[in-house]
Image (cartoon, rainbow, N blue to C red):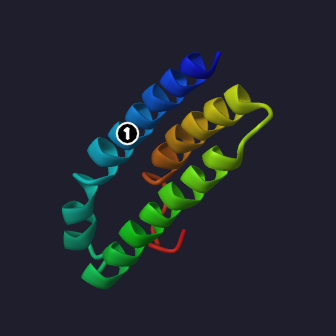
Amino acid sequence: MAFRVALSAFLALVVVMGIGRFAFTPQVPLMIHDGQLTLTSASLVAALNYLGYLCGSFDAMRARRRVELRLQLGVWGAVTLTLLSACVSAPWL
């Protein structure tokens, strides 16, 4: 069971990191060019992204119950937020 959970977490991390890297990263130069982001706000968005990874890893270390549900919610949350990032016009949104 522990191996299965660890493998699931690894695959979920690969998916979420892949979505974040390959969906958001190519958008940044276009968003800067269109004036939606400045270099400072893009840096803040990146820092908050890494803060999210840190909080998620702390949560995963302490998780004892509903681990599978947390993994599923994390992956779907990343997908949803990535899709919503195309609909906002301000960096703080």
Q: What residue type is labelled 1?
A: Ile
Residue 47: image x %, image y %?
Answer: 40, 71
The quadrant of the picture occupied by the N terminus is: top right
Residue positioned 62% across, 45% down in the render: 60
In the rendered view, tell whether residue 20 sits above or below residue 64: below
Camera-side residue: 16 or 11? 11
Q: In the picture, residue 10 is in which quadrant?
A: top left
Camera-side residue: 50 or 39? 50
In the rendered view, tell whether residue 69 sits above or below residue 47: above
Left or right of 28 on screen, residue 56: right
In the rendered view, tell whether residue 93 sits above or below residue 52: below
Furthest residue toward bottom: 40
Camera-side residue: 41 or 74? 74
Left or right of 13 on screen, residue 21: left
Residue positioned 46% across, 54% down in the render: 85
Furthest residue toward front: 2
In the rendered view, tell whether residue 45 sits above or below residue 14: below
Residue positioned 31% across, 84% down in the render: 40
Residue positioned 72% across, 29% down in the render: 69
Residue 59: image x %, image y %?
Answer: 66, 51
Residue 43: image x %, image y %?
Answer: 32, 76
Left or right of 58 on screen, residue 25: left
Furthest residue toward right: 65
Residue 2 visible in the picture: yes
Q: Residue at label 1? A: 19
As helix, strand or loop, the secondary structure at mark 1 comes to: helix
The quadrant of the picture occupied by the C terminus is: bottom right
